[in-house]
Amino acid sequence: MATVLSVSGSPSASSRTQRLLRHLDDRLLAQGHDVIALDVRTVPAEALLGADFRHPAIVEAAELFARADGVVVATPVYKASYSGVLKALLDLLPQYALAGKTVLPLATGGSTAHVLAIDYALRPVLSSMGAAHIVQGWFTLDQDITVRDDGSLAVASQADEALARVVDQFSAALGRSPLLAAAG
Ligand SMILES: Cc1cc2nc3c(=O)[nH]c(=O)nc-3n(C[C@H](O)[C@H](O)[C@H](O)COP(=O)(O)O)c2cc1C
């Protein structure tokens, strides 16, 4: 099975994007994939804002990308685009950090006006980083994601079903990945 890097691009300490992503990680784990979580908000700000390519946290993040067969990139929509912290991290990775990899782009947002942010903003960046295959992404409205008082997560059923579909398509695409096929 594949190694999947699951990247949350939210700077928020109570991020719905991050909670949703970890919920989707469970589905990938159940399908037999190894899943490694990376929350951009845990990368030291001085490394991100100082463009410190040699900072151990940036070197480690680059290694995680290099090891992965597939990458899930999830971002909140901020100002009609992906988050600034996500871009700050992507800017510090090698130009072709996604070469040969299968990528699933996801976004959460407050307004359906920005449902296409994945396609007009995030997808071109992922493509420029050499992604071999960017599967269909999904935008989830923040109001469809609820963190209950006990800390558990509830996702509106239509949104959850749609997300399960794109995760399964990603999983199937990973199975057809040229990198995995070459590894036997
Ligand atoms: C600074 C800021 C800017 C935002 N800009 C947008 C926007 O342009 N379009 C949109 O649909 N939602 C926007 N939102 C709403 C967030 O995308 C949405 O609540 C998201 O689910 C937050 O995810 P998070 O909890 O992981 O940070 C914005 C929220 C913040 C805090």
Image (tube, rainbow, N blue to C red):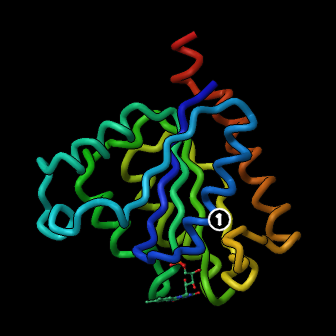
Horizontal relation, residue 60 to residue 2: left or right = left
* Residue 121 image position (x, y, % from top left): 47, 71
**Viewer can see residue 106:** yes
Quarter of image, res 46? bottom left
Give the amino acid type for the residue marked by disc 1 in the picture. Answer: Leu
Q: Residue at the location (51% across, 32% down)?
A: 69
**Number of residue marks:** 1
Q: Which of 116 and 108 is in front in this view?
A: 108
* Residue 67 image position (x, y, % from top left): 40, 31
Q: Tell me the SS state at disc 1.
A: helix
Outermost residue, front direction? 150
Quarter of image, res 43? bottom left
Q: Residue at the location (68% across, 38% down)?
A: 29
Horizontal relation, residue 89 to residue 170: left or right = left
Residue corresponding to mark 1: 20
Looking at the image, is 130 positioned above or below residue 145? above
Horizontal relation, residue 174 to residue 183: left or right = right
Q: Residue at the location (43% across, 59% down)?
A: 39
Q: Where the N terminus falls, by quadrant?
A: top right
* Residue 101 image position (x, y, % from top left): 49, 37
Does the numbered disc 1 mark a residue whose Cβ is under 8 Å from ligand 1?
Answer: yes
**Viewer can see residue 146:** no
* Residue 84 image position (x, y, % from top left): 34, 75
The residue carrying pointer 1 sits among few (fewer than 14), some (14 to 19) or many (20 or more) residues within 10 Å by Cα, namely many
Q: Where the C terminus falls, by quadrant?
A: top right
Looking at the image, is 79 positioned above or below residue 81? below
Q: Residue at the location (12% across, 57% down)?
A: 52
Looking at the image, is 65 positioned above or below residue 18? above
